[in-house]
Image (tube, rainbow, N blue to C red):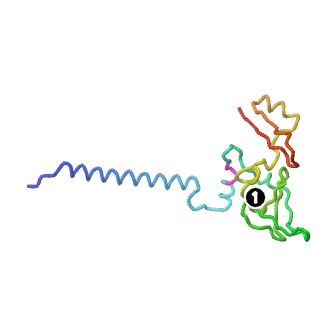
Amino acid sequence: MTTTNPTAILSVVLLIAGVAVMLVAHILVVFWALLRGLGSRGSSQHAANQEERVEDGRGRRGLSSGELATLPCHEYFKAAADGETGDCAVCLEAFEAGDRCRQLPRCEHSFHAECVDSWLRKSSACPVCRVDAVDRRPPKGEAKAAAVSGVVVVDMAGRRSSRPAPEIVIER
């Protein structure tokens, strides 16, 4: 007759339980990734919709397609007197004649339109100076209503620059 060692039985049971836990954890991670869209993305439209919903780390959401359409675009051309070409701060490539560029109106920084559009879908701030790309402050008549609702807008004026002053919005 053979006697079974209780330690060996316990080791086998613990090994099987460990493998089962790891299998369940793997299945849950794969399921979570598929739900979040981290797996293979079904369509580019789905990816674009996901990008529009992303907020940056400061709670500011990216710009919608309508807001992006309001930002001016231009075709880049190299001035004859200007020996230097600018660079796109998003892709770090030099601007070339004929490139479609977008200039942000509040800070006047220029980027390739395709590069800055993908950035602005995720964050509404300029990639260089972090100023909001569009002015989302309420018109002056609505400022009192915003103050009553608990939003405080602090305008950082008084610095010497041709660029608009940044603003701080604090929500209570």
Q: Report the label total.
A: 1
Question: Of residues 56 and 145, which is closer to you in this image?
Answer: 56
Q: Residue at x 76, y 30 (%)?
A: 149
Q: Is residue 70 visible?
A: no
x and y, in percent, of residue 46 in the image: 65, 57
Question: Of residues 118 and 160, which is closer to you in this image?
Answer: 160
Tell me the quadrant of the picture where the N terminus can be found.
bottom left
Residue 63 lies left or right of residue 159; in this view the side is left
Q: Residues within 10 Å of mark 1 (few under 14, many from 20)?
A: many
Label 1 secondary element: helix
The residue that disc 1 covers is 116
Farthest residue, direction right: 81
Q: Main secondary structure of the magenta part?
A: helix
Residue 132 lies left or right of residue 82; in this view the side is left
The amino acid type found where label 1 is placed reads: Val
Tell me the quadrant of the picture where the C terminus can be found.
top right
Residue 108 falls in image quadrant: bottom right
Task: Specify the segment rendered in magenta.
Answer: 51-55
x and y, in percent, of residue 121 in the image: 72, 54
Q: Residue at x 69, y 57 (%)?
A: 48
x and y, in percent, of residue 50 in the image: 66, 54
